[in-house]
Structures are given as C-alpha cells and as structure tokens.
Amino acid sequence: MNVRALETLVHLLGHPSFSAVAEARNMTLSAVSMQMKALEKELNAELFDRQSRPPRLTPLGRQVALQAQGVLAERDDLLSLCQSDHGLTGQFLIGFIQTASVRILPHFLANARRLAPKATFQFAAGLSETLSDDVAEGRLDAAVVTQVDQEVAHLKFQRLATEEMVMALPASHADDDLDTLSAALPFIRFRPTSGIGRLISTSIAKAKQKPDSQLILDSIEGTLECVKLGLGYTVLPAPDVVRYADDRLVTRSVEGTYPGRDLVLVTRDDKTSGRWRDEVFGLMQLTP
Amino acid sequence: MNVRALETLVHLLGHPSFSAVAEARNMTLSAVSMQMKALEKELNAELFDRQSRPPRLTPLGRQVALQAQGVLAERDDLLSLCQSDHGLTGQFLIGFIQTASVRILPHFLANARRLAPKATFQFAAGLSETLSDDVAEGRLDAAVVTQVDQEVAHLKFQRLATEEMVMALPASHADDDLDTLSAALPFIRFRPTSGIGRLISTSIAKAKQKPDSQLILDSIEGTLECVKLGLGYTVLPAPDVVRYADDRLVTRSVEGTYPGRDLVLVTRDDKTSGRWRDEVFGLMQLTP
DNA sequence: TAACAAATTCAGTTTTGGTGAACTTGATGA
DNA sequence: TCATCAAGTTCACCAAAACTGAATTTGTTA
C-alpha cells in the first residue's frame, strides 16, 4: 500500500481533475493516472467512473478517500511524535518498589501529566533486585529501588530520597534498654532477599549485635503486626512504621546505628538513556 | 513513509530481535536492518539502542511502534472497505425533494442501517430540476424527484411511489361546483419553477381551463394557508394537503383530470451507477 | 463535426527495496 | 581477558516500482 497514492486520492476530494491534482502535487498527469490505476488494481475496486472526463470518484472511491484521510492522519500523528518539541516523548516502562509506589509514583504521575504530556508510562512493581535486573536487561527503562550495591556494571543510580530507619517495639517494652529488650524478645527481620532486608542484616552485622533468636518475615505489615502482638521488635524505614502504627507499638530512634535507606532511580548507563534520564529524574522529584 | 517498514517495526514489539522478525516476515536480516535505519533517518529519531545486541527499542521507538499500529489499523479498515462482502459500500450523495424527505428518507435511513451498514450517506434538499442537474453533472449520485421529463440524456428514472392529486378549497365553498368556485375564487398555483409546480400548470393547460385570476406561491404550507383563509383554491398532492389539513379546508377528488405525481429515483445511466443503483432503489422501498 | 482539454498508454530512465557475501560488534563462557 | 559465536551492519549488485515525456485516445464543447 503506497502512502503517496493515498495522498493523491485525498487530494482528488478537493480538486476537480487528475490534472489539477498533478499540478498541486508537482507530478505529471500520467503519474497521477498510473497511481490511481495501481491503487484500483491493488484494492480490486472501481474508485473512478472513467466514462466521464474528468474521471469522477465513485461512491466507493469517495469512501476510500475518506478512509485514506484517516490513514494519513495517523501517519501525521506518528510524524509529530518525532518532532521533539514538547519535552519527553516515548513510552517508558518504569518499576517501583512498594514504598516508592506510595511515596514517589503519585508525584511522578502529577508531574508527568503537566510537564511531559506526550510521554506515556507503564509501571511495574517488584523487589529492588528484580527491578534492577529488569532495567539492566532492558525489560524496564528505569526503576525506583533501594540502593543495591555501590556499583553495578552499566547501571546508573541517582538518589531520590532517604528514609530514616527506626526501631519498632511493643508498647509493653517501651522502657527497656536494648540489652533487656533483646534478652526478652526476638528480633524480627524483614525478608533478606529483598533490598531492604539485606540492608538491615548488614547493618546488624556492623553493629556487632548477635540477637539470640530471630524471626524472619516477608512483609512489612506482617512484621509490624508481630511487634504489635508483643512477639518481638524490629527495625524498619520510618515511613513504613508510621503507616501501620497504633498504640500497641512504640518507636525508638536508631540514628547513628543504622544508616538511612536511600531510594534511587536506576537506569542503564548508555547513550540513549542519557537523552531522557535527567528529565525522568526531574519528574521524580517531589517539587520539580 | 513506507508502510512495510512500519509493519516491520510493529513486529519488533513482539519479537526479540531483528533476525526473529526477518524470519517471521520472510525477509533477510539485512533488509530489516536497512528498513529500520531508513525509518530512523526519515523520522530523524533514535528508535533503537544499538549499543546493545540485539538492538533494543528506545521508549520513543516503542511509542512510534504503538502509533504505527494505529496507522496499520486504519490501513486495514481501508482494505476491508473494498472487500465487497457486506452489500453496499461507499459514500453516497443523495438528494430529496421536500415531499420525499418526509415520505421516503426515514424509511431509507432505517433500511440502510439494517441492510447497508458499511455505506454512508449525505443528503441534499432541493427542487426537482436542481437535483436532477446535480445528478447529471455528478454532484450527486442519486436523487428522489418528481418526474421531470420522460427522457433525459444519460439519466435513468425509476418510479418509487405515486401521489394522488387533490383539490383543496375553503370549507365555506364546499358545495360549489367547479364553475361557481372558479368564478368566486382565484386558483392558487404552487411556484412553477419547481417540478410539482410545472406539472400542475401543464395539466391545467391540458384541461383547457383558464382561471380568471391566479395567485402564485412558492411554498405548499403557504398555499394551503391561503386556502384556509378563503383566499382561493388549489390542487396539490394528497399527502401534502393531508399533512396541513384542518377544518377550514375541504378536499375534492380530481382523479381523471389530474394525473398522479410520481416520485422517481434519478441516477446516471452509466456502468458504475449500475453497480449500486438497484440496491439503492431497494433501500428506498417502504417495505424492502 | 472539428477542436480542445484531459486522461491513458508506452518506452525509457531514475529511484527504491531487496539479496547475499563480507565485515563488524556486543554477549557469552572458559 | 580472550576466543567464540550469534546477530547486526555495510556493500556491491540486481529486480521491481515509480516517474517522465511523447504519442495516442477519448469525452466534452463550440
């Protein structure tokens, strides 16, 4: 299907004769005639009544011309996608870990609607490692994760926000010092296969604490529920603790002992990502 | 803009590599590569990240591919227009005289919706002569008019319906015979430039009546309003009289004196019209 | 019916799109 | 890190398509 022939056909809706269209389009009359003939043959349809001179569009030809306008309109939309005049353009596949999908995604959507109206987005949820892998292997363009390692080949990390870590313990043990607490209750660890879990376990190693007993759970809400029931204590990012907090639970600062948790934007470190990385990073800011 | 290149691009949304697409589309790998390269050049856009192997769609490339699907969908719609499987296809420009737009057009629309869903229509209103000219000169495909002349070059007439003519006179003159009536009141003629008007005037000539005085009006409703006010009497198609009748007006049969008025479908008498004429004629029937 | 304007046909030329071989380049694994 | 491999790119070349201009045909108009 030749788009130039469709353009010619559409012109015939507005011009009275093949020759008029030929002039308007800077072609010879014979080229117009041949284009239309080829189109009729390809479609196996009579688009013109050739018993009259100039040839007249048949009702079918008219409808085909109308539909051709639709094709050309879509084509023009396609072309205008590539006129990089209004900021970010493209379909971006972006992953968010749970926390980020609450803290960052809403802002991102609002910013994008305003500042990147021609871009579209598709979001994925997952754990930090999975999402980083997805970015590294091209299944995602970018992801917001917790810092995985200081350097990963061909990936670039940009810090978006830091979440303070905080200890959550049962209200009944609010006055215990750390030794008493760890003697009385097990430490509940968030599942170490996720980014946040691994961070905590290395921190504990650094602090040289050896809790006598440990529980390992794989959900933040579940972990805090155990704390509320007096089954143990834990350390989690402050926003997560606050979200699920009630009066059966108290918090205690662990500043100095535990580093904050960084939310970072991961992208591939290649030339093409460079074209949009900073713009996407900007849209992730709470106040861009 | 090459449609085949767009098809290739769309295939790349579902296949992992150029070579996979090449195989799926029965082309060589180098052809795929060159198509994509040409497309990037034409759009002046980076659709692929060529630093990775296989080349990966960029976010922009992905969006362009999505938009390309839109182009192809419109293209497919165009192709399907020409698969003449579901009856009448095309955009038809059809004229109706006033009476016909009331008596025939509603049925036509209902029939067309049911029997010719792929056809579209655009309607024009006018007088019989104008509409016939429009058909003859290709501005309309067909028209429903009153019989203009028995034969007009290159036009074909098909009778759709006959409207009986009837005399309308003021109720106050209900018992007058024709001589008394014509002595007492002027004959009111519908404007002779329209088909119906001319028909009446020739009939009068044939009947060798010479009304002493005449009024000439150009609207049916206006003509009947004058009759209702006792200003004269007239002869009009029965359906029109019935539509505007009230108790100030009585009717009298003129069968034998005036021939009925035929509503006919006018089309050009050429080969292409022949393809759809009978179908359109069928849709005009009250019970097709 | 002649004359004209416009569409079609046709031979020749340019442009485009494609192939296959040779070459280059990321990715993979020892 | 290096060798190997699979996959993409480039290039020379060929075939098909699209266009031009001249010759021809054909409705339309005077």
Image (cartoon, coloured by chain):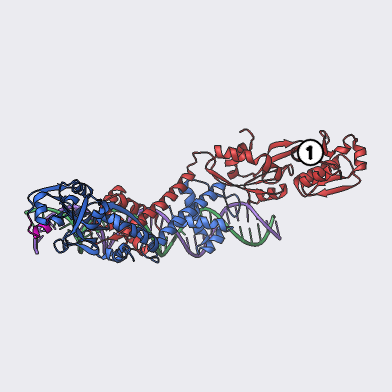
Chain colours: A blue, B red, C green, D purple
Q: Residue at x 61, y 51 (%)?
A: A52
**In the rendered image, which residue does mark 1 sit on?**
B246
Quadrant position of the C terminus of chain B in the picture: top right
Please indicate, yes or no, whether residue A94 appears anywhere in the rendered image.
Answer: no
Q: Position of residue A62 (x, y in %)?
A: 55, 50
Q: Chain of mark 1?
A: B
Quarter where residue B51 is shown: bottom left
Question: For this view, does A2 lie left or right of residue B168?
Answer: left
Quadrant position of the N terminus of chain B in the picture: bottom left
Q: Mark 1 packing: few (<14 Cα in 10 Å), some, or many (20+)?
A: few
Q: Position of residue A220 (x, y in %)?
A: 21, 50
Is residue B148 or residue A171 the one in the foreground? Answer: A171
Quarter where residue B9 is shown: bottom left
Q: Position of residue B123 (x, y in %)?
A: 63, 47
Q: Amino acid at mark 1?
A: Asp
Quarter where residue B44 is shown: bottom left
Is residue A96 or residue A187 the one in the foreground? Answer: A187
Question: For this view, does A125 lie left or right of residue A30?
Answer: left
What number of labels is visible?
1
Q: Residue at x 71, y 40 (%)?
A: B263
The part of the chain drawn in magenta is A201-209
Q: Position of residue B254 (x, y in %)?
A: 83, 35
Helix, strand or loop for disc 1: loop
**Residue A224, above or below B52:** above
Assign the magenta stretch its main secondary structure: helix
Q: Does the magenta portion include A137?
A: no
Is residue A206 or residue B32 the one in the foreground? Answer: A206
Please indicate, yes or no, whether residue A234 appears anywhere in the rendered image.
Answer: yes
